[in-house]
Amino acid sequence: MTAEENRMDQPIGVAVIGAGYWGPNLVRNAQATPAMTLRYLCDLDTDKAHRVLGGYSTVRVSGSLEEVLADPAVDAVAIATPAATHLPVAMAALRAGKHVLVEKPLAANYADGHRLVREAEERGLTLMLDHTFCYTPAVQHLRHLVRSGEIGTVQYLDSVRVNLGLVQPDVDVLWDLAPHDLSIFDAILPDGVHVTRVAAHGSDPIGAGRACIGHLTLELSDGVLAHVHVNWLSPTKIRTMIVGGSRRTVVWDDLNIVQRISVHDRGADLTPADLGEAERRQAIISYRRGETVAPALPEREALRGVMAEFAASITEKRAPLTDGWSGLRVLAILEAASASLAGGGEFVRVRDARRPAEWEEAVA
Amino acid sequence: MTAEENRMDQPIGVAVIGAGYWGPNLVRNAQATPAMTLRYLCDLDTDKAHRVLGGYSTVRVSGSLEEVLADPAVDAVAIATPAATHLPVAMAALRAGKHVLVEKPLAANYADGHRLVREAEERGLTLMLDHTFCYTPAVQHLRHLVRSGEIGTVQYLDSVRVNLGLVQPDVDVLWDLAPHDLSIFDAILPDGVHVTRVAAHGSDPIGAGRACIGHLTLELSDGVLAHVHVNWLSPTKIRTMIVGGSRRTVVWDDLNIVQRISVHDRGADLTPADLGEAERRQAIISYRRGETVAPALPEREALRGVMAEFAASITEKRAPLTDGWSGLRVLAILEAASASLAGGGEFVRVRDARRPAEWEEAVA
Amino acid sequence: MTAEENRMDQPIGVAVIGAGYWGPNLVRNAQATPAMTLRYLCDLDTDKAHRVLGGYSTVRVSGSLEEVLADPAVDAVAIATPAATHLPVAMAALRAGKHVLVEKPLAANYADGHRLVREAEERGLTLMLDHTFCYTPAVQHLRHLVRSGEIGTVQYLDSVRVNLGLVQPDVDVLWDLAPHDLSIFDAILPDGVHVTRVAAHGSDPIGAGRACIGHLTLELSDGVLAHVHVNWLSPTKIRTMIVGGSRRTVVWDDLNIVQRISVHDRGADLTPADLGEAERRQAIISYRRGETVAPALPEREALRGVMAEFAASITEKRAPLTDGWSGLRVLAILEAASASLAGGGEFVRVRDARRPAEWEEAVA
Amino acid sequence: MTAEENRMDQPIGVAVIGAGYWGPNLVRNAQATPAMTLRYLCDLDTDKAHRVLGGYSTVRVSGSLEEVLADPAVDAVAIATPAATHLPVAMAALRAGKHVLVEKPLAANYADGHRLVREAEERGLTLMLDHTFCYTPAVQHLRHLVRSGEIGTVQYLDSVRVNLGLVQPDVDVLWDLAPHDLSIFDAILPDGVHVTRVAAHGSDPIGAGRACIGHLTLELSDGVLAHVHVNWLSPTKIRTMIVGGSRRTVVWDDLNIVQRISVHDRGADLTPADLGEAERRQAIISYRRGETVAPALPEREALRGVMAEFAASITEKRAPLTDGWSGLRVLAILEAASASLAGGGEFVRVRDARRPAEWEEAVA
């Protein structure tokens, strides 16, 4: 048995970097994942890290990223530091040969994100985005419904994510909330979310210095229109996504805890084109008003699924569901949205963030 | 007692023009309004008119608009014919000295609408729009909350009106549904809805030949942003309007029959400007998370209120709540929205449809 | 063609008796039913009757029941007078050879109701209860689900009907509201609702002099337990019925206007009896957690269906869905419930109100 | 400084007994309570205890209750073992001088529960019930609304707790679920829940060998009626409590995560008694249809509050909110309910479980 084979049998050694808002969730779920051993919680503020772990933990605290990355028992890191630090922290981890799970957004801009994706591919390391929502039972089911063809071809997408949320000090509401919607689009569409153009409108009615309300209109590469409404100022929480299909339309209401997903056999159809002109003018549209089916969804924590996919992608040496490219596609849309917002709301072209075919050979 | 004084004591003689989709509702509510006497139901298709009245009615049917307008017992007409006919029918009625209540939209375009408004003002006749939603208890209460200052200054407006609706043969979803939202904005805002620019995005995923999904972004003259989402293809019905204010935010969910209006003491505020720079950067935003109050609203049919306001405005010789100018403001926004949609979604300037000051004298 | 045959081609002449709370609904729906001609609205207070008809009606008003019953153009009457008058009014109508539709409850007590049923059978006339809810699309679908066997055998019934309702001057909340629930049970169960014993608990916390809150526990003849909770004092309206079946369980939430009926493949099952004792003790219960299906229900007014069934039962000379026997079964339960309430809540035996087999011959 | 004073400054040493369904929650919350130090997780199945703690914990596992109780560092135990073991485990703990927090129900029967209460009082130790729901923000607010007199005097109580739940092997649905409702009644009513008589109806439609559906009707000592509906077989989850008051009525819908508590100014009132007889008969009831207020409730875990109250009651040497007597009152009702169920549903008298006045002296 070789040394590497030997290692394969052992849990993946993990360090969580960042003990702020999200770090405790990573700590808890890493501990609960059998395929992992949590080695460190790393934060410059070691007191904060100790508080996160509580008084009963055997996990080590470190204030030094170098120390953590130098430890051969650490195979992978989960990064929950501010977005502006994703590039240096993730790059250091990759260069130290560690697999990387990183909070959204992948990086502060597309170019930085692209460097991380390139670095990971060249080194054959997993680079995964913690697009947590993609691992909920609801999105997993949506993904199945869309990809299996059960709802027909996708005709439109509409997502609303509003709540009284914390006005972020560094980013506007588009960068704070829309990554959730965009990463879900990316997870459920058969070939990822490929947006040609985006228009963004925003508003800052309280004078916060950045958009607190945002509307994104996305033109997808196949002509489909998608819309995203995000809002930090709404007194009521709404989290609803509609995926309109040619055969069925799915409504995902994440706050309806007894029926999150509803698959509606309701819609309008164009009658077949071989009618005579006079008939077509009269009867051009027909309506389906059939039943609604709500699938039984399991209850499980999404972040547990993130951890399981991170571990599996490392062990199986394959791209995770939410790989660096999906993170890059989200970044590309956000960058174009910011340009549209700055430019007065016109449509702005979005970079193509598909994995180039030539990379296959270069990397392989 | 003069002949006119004598007439004042009598109910207003009314004819309903058009026995199609909405006409029966006008017939029923005109009959139930004590200040009115319904004289005619007028439709080219007199069989249809007879069917609407049923077999137990004493109301006269006429197939001739001329006959109806020539009858001195008819003081006023309520028009529920296709939008394209609003100009000739309403103009004929005004020229015959009749007061006019007309379905939305006022006319097929702004210029036609303007001619009707001018004609009515010159003749001293009531020209009223049947913006039915404005007469619901919910909108009446919203209007009170906004105009009394209870919610502070309006910071944003958001309206969603989606359902599996009939794809109209002559107009797109913006012209079909958005007049409701726009006329409500006009009714509740202190000085009517004054929009400087509008951007429209739309989509026709079923190939109906016109937009079935539409998004309007409105820049109001005081810098407030409003958004309207209308959709004929949604399998679920949503009718929600959020009116964000500096002190309170109102959510109107018209499908929540036990709590249509919720007034939330929840929101984010900027802290006062007299803090030092360092403090401001840290504590710039504060949050209110107070109680929600749902007022008791009466249950009454909105169209009953339309008829009462029509009768009162005639009797009291005053402008009705939803007068011709409000109809014109809605038309101005719709025309600009169509231009934006045709032009690729950029912002388009909206005509100013305020009553010009010089008209006061000219007409008076 | 005989005179009777000739009459068959003509609409059924109808008189509505009673212009109070429910009468106007009967008037409106009788007028809208093609198979009927509304001849009279009859009320001692003829002014009230005129007000109900409004100023545009050709329907005659009469203050004399005798006049109405003497008119050969009247084939049938729809009675919406106070319950205490049902016996004399309905009996007079039957003796005059008129078919009868009567508001719930059939009569003030079982004996009176039985006399009406007997009279109608002997004369070969239709005696129908206006159990309006039984003609809603929701109950029609429930009836189909139960009778077709789609939900398996019925295991339990639970109905909640609470609201801030008018405290009635003459009856308690059980007699006011529970007839709805009981008549629905009767309509959906394969052979009608056959209750062996009932226990009633009630409460009058505001000192109204009669129970304002009531709970009924019904033992059905096949051992099934049903429960009904009615309440005049609840600030929120709840109208929910659960029909538990061995294969599916149906939840009918009448206030959920977009999904009134939900058919749940969820439940607990006993494992088959051929397991060994040890296994049975461990694994005795299994759980189904399958999908939920919400059928598409048409929107139509239930009272339209009542009128159509009344007309059809007359024309086709057959018992209507909600015939006198169903009204009698409801009365039998209510009488026993009152006895239980008076007696301190113990179970009280309920009369068997099945149509006796010997009646078949006696009447035929 | 005496030894005892010294101990007062230190966290309370706690052992959790039982690593089954609820134990892990006790472990987590004890660890998160600053006033406590978790010393042991004790379970006969030490492997299970190790699994609950996970691989990163410094908490000790013990398979021996004796060992745990013999350790002077253990001041208090939290017991989450099966109900049948509560008496011996809690008694042993009390006799070892430990304070006790015990899962509901306090014991398998009233007599056993009473022995525990007596033992704790005689030893001056805290005996507290983990009536978790009583520590939710919703119940805390309900308690405030009732006790402050804001809703006037309580007129009725109605609680529904239905779901597809696990059919328990040892107890029926009344013993499994109703303790929640009864303990909440006890916590919110000004002087605890004092029930004079209870009637219980139940049903076992799947043949599980014990009631799976249960209805309790409770007569409170002040004449108020309360009703509890518990059900293991409902496909939909309902958790609604209505507290009807003379001035306001509160509806608590625990599944409405955005508006759990609604305080309704809606109800029916009897008009004052000084009206003449004729007037009273006409206008006996008046209706309030005012606004609804939904308070802002904090989001916090109820079990955290349980632990804080346990710690505070020990430190402050006072009875906790949910003391042994409250547990005893719940037991008294459950015992009478079982007797009613066995006896065919008649009302059964409930023991008075108020703390006897003479105990004050005896114990003090």
Image (cartoon, coloured by chain):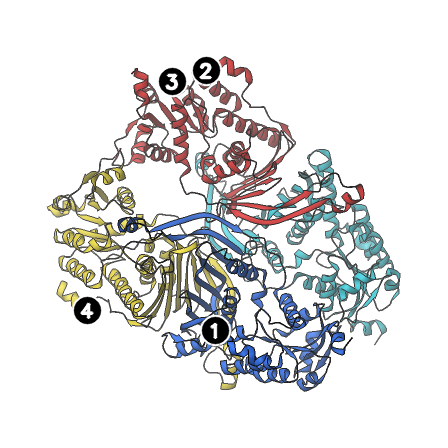
Chain colours: A cyan, B red, C yellow, D blue
Q: Callout 4: residue from which chain?
A: C
**Is circle 2 on the same chain as circle 1?**
no
- Say above or below: B199 vs D154: above
**Three-letter residue code for mark 3:** Gly
**Is circle 1 on the same chain as circle 4?**
no
Q: Earlier in the sequence, mark 3 or mark 2?
A: 3
Q: Residue C132 at x, y = what percent?
A: 31, 53
Viewer-nearest of discs 4 and 3: 3
Looking at the rendered structure, the secondary structure element under dot 3 is: loop
Q: Callout 3: residue from which chain?
A: B
Looking at the rendered structure, the secondary structure element under dot 2 is: helix
**Three-letter residue code for mark 4:** Ala
The CA span between labels 4 and 2 is 81 Å
The residue to which callout 1 is attached is: D173
Viewer-nearest of discs 4 and 2: 2
**Is circle 1 on the same chain as circle 3?**
no
| The label number, if any, that marks residue B97 in the structure image | 3
The residue to which callout 4 is attached is: C357
**Three-letter residue code for mark 2:** Glu
The residue to which callout 2 is attached is: B122
Q: Residue C50 at x, y = what percent?
A: 24, 37
**Three-letter residue code for mark 1:** Val
The CA span between labels 1 and 3 is 75 Å
